[in-house]
Image: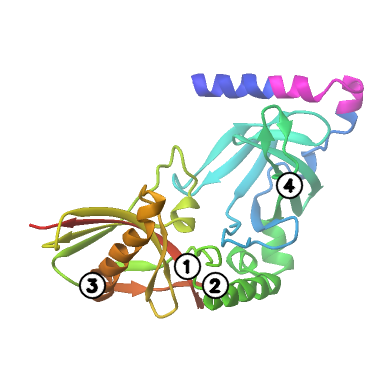
Amino acid sequence: MQIRILWALCLAAFALASCGNGTEEAEESNRPSFKPILGTDFYEVRRAFDNGLSYDSIGFVQVPEWHLKFIDEDSIQVYSIIEDSMFTYTVYHDHEDYFHFARESWKVIDVHPDSLLLQRLSLRGLKVDKERSNVYMRFYSKRYIDEVLQTTVEALRRPGPNDTAFVRQMVARANAYLEPDSAFASMDYAQLTSRHPSMSVSKRKIDSLKQSAAHAYLYPEYDLTIDNAYKDFYYTFSVVVDTAGTLHLGDITTAVMPEFLESRERVIQGIIDVYLANWLDVTPATTLGMRHGSVVYLRVRGRQW
């Protein structure tokens, strides 16, 4: 309850800070109306950056997944995949075509009985961060999808030819330069499993309160424990996984003095060559069916016993 009150207060403060020019009547006259789409089920069919692509150069992908329905000018229902249910939110009008609902901020670009285009806004304090507000979401009504297009939501949500061409370029770059800066992340990130009884492997879970869901595939982390190691040790580092599943040392993330960096690299490379290369099964990352170099982050602990 306190969170909802705080959210409402923040929105009110944002509205006061954003207005100030023109009269209240002028603001209302410029406000888009949701009356033409009340009661209509809309499914998100495309989510893309302002360049028209769903992917960026590091492998982050905009995934269309929303299902919403305006039930009044100031009320909206949004489907939750986790809860498998529709939840009702209040729609707060800010000024002109800016709105807030479902704990997000939006600019309404276009409202049509069969389509809806929203721009997702990123706020910095009480102002819109224009550089980061570069994501657009296209919705179609269920009637339009079923009767006019005669297709499915799943088919419409598939990446387009421009996405495929862009990903192909990023894959070529990642495979040509097996370095962390050139690697391409993937929702189908590299998988590591142990094939030796003395090694255990577990994928580290993200902190959902501090990290976005995309963090899990952009920066996949694994904890590896090696029993009967040559000595006790604990190192954190990244590796680039190539299309054959071979591990290439990336960056050492354990704190180390510059004068000891070279010797530390030799030690970790030895651990990769002796233990990881022989005791791990590695499945490379793939995007749109294409294998490519990607980065995984490892926390490797060795125990003598």
- Percent x, y for residue 87? 54, 38
Residue 174 image label: 2
N-term-proximal mark, 2 vs 1? 2
Most common secondary structure along the magenta stretch: helix
Is 121 a magenta residue?
no
Separation of disc 3 and disc 2 at Cα?
26 Å
Residue annotated with mark 4: 118
The residue located at (54%, 63%) in the rendering is 181
- Give, as a three-letter code, the residue at label 2: Ala
Nearer to us of marks 3 and 2 is 3
Q: What is the span of residues highlighted in magenta in the rendered image? A: 13-27
Of callouts 3 and 2, the N-terminal one: 2
Q: Which class describes the residues within 10 Å of circle 4: few (<14), some (14-19), or many (20+)? A: some
Looking at marks 3 and 4 on the same chain, the residue that comes earlier in the sequence is marked by 4
Tell me how far mark 2 sits from mark 1, CA to CA: 7 Å
Residue beneath disc 1: 294
Q: Which element is circle 3 on?
A: helix
Place of residue 200 in the rendered image (x, y in percent of width and height, measured from the top left): 20, 61
**Cα separation between marks 4 and 1:** 32 Å
Which of the two discs, 2 and 4, sits closer to the camera? 2
Work out whether residue 221 can be spotted.
no
| Residue 44 % position (x, y) | 64, 55
Q: CA distance from mark 3 to mark 4?
A: 53 Å
